[in-house]
Image (tube, helix red, strand yellow):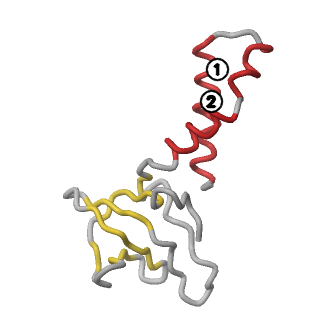
Amino acid sequence: MNKILQERLHKARLEYEDSLALPEWDRKQIHGIDFEKGADFALNHQWINIDESLPPCHDNVISHVSIGVIVCTSKGVIRYAYYYYYLHQWFSAETSTRIDNVTKWMFVPGKGGEK
């Protein structure tokens, strides 16, 4: 899982625990696998602002291309795309054309940052 999403998951869990105002021994019960899986699923399906982070690179050092992600432009257009780090530009995975004005991205649901 992406580091940003891990931090969000941890923060969400702590905020949830604080909102319940439970004693420490009761808090251990809400650390069960159902809460973790549900929170992990919800956090893996959120948009990430491009000012906050860009998608991780493939292991191929030569290309400097991100993994495939879903992007959204300022006009609400949603595409499957890659970020080319050496060009500082987004390109459509379907048409290989440049995508301008990308504002946010998210991992492809079900892949959660897999390369």
Which residue is pictured at 63% across the width and 17% down the height? 18
Kind of element beneath mark 1:
helix
Residue 104 shown left or right of residue 60 in the figure: left
Image location of residue 74, percent across then percent down: 24, 57
Residue 75 appears in which quarter of the rendering? bottom left
Mark 2 is on which residue type? Arg
Mark 1 is on which residue type? Glu
Kind of element beneath mark 2:
helix
Residue 74 shown left or right of residue 29 in the figure: left
Say the numbered circle drawn on residue 42: none
Which residue is pictured at 64% across the width and 20% down the height? 17
Disc 1, disc 2: CB below 8 Å? yes
Q: Which residue is mark 1?
A: 17
Out of 108 and 101, give the one closest to the viewer. 108
Q: Which residue is mark 2?
A: 13
Which residue is pictured at 69% across the width and 35% down the height? 33
Residue 14 appears in which quarter of the rendering? top right
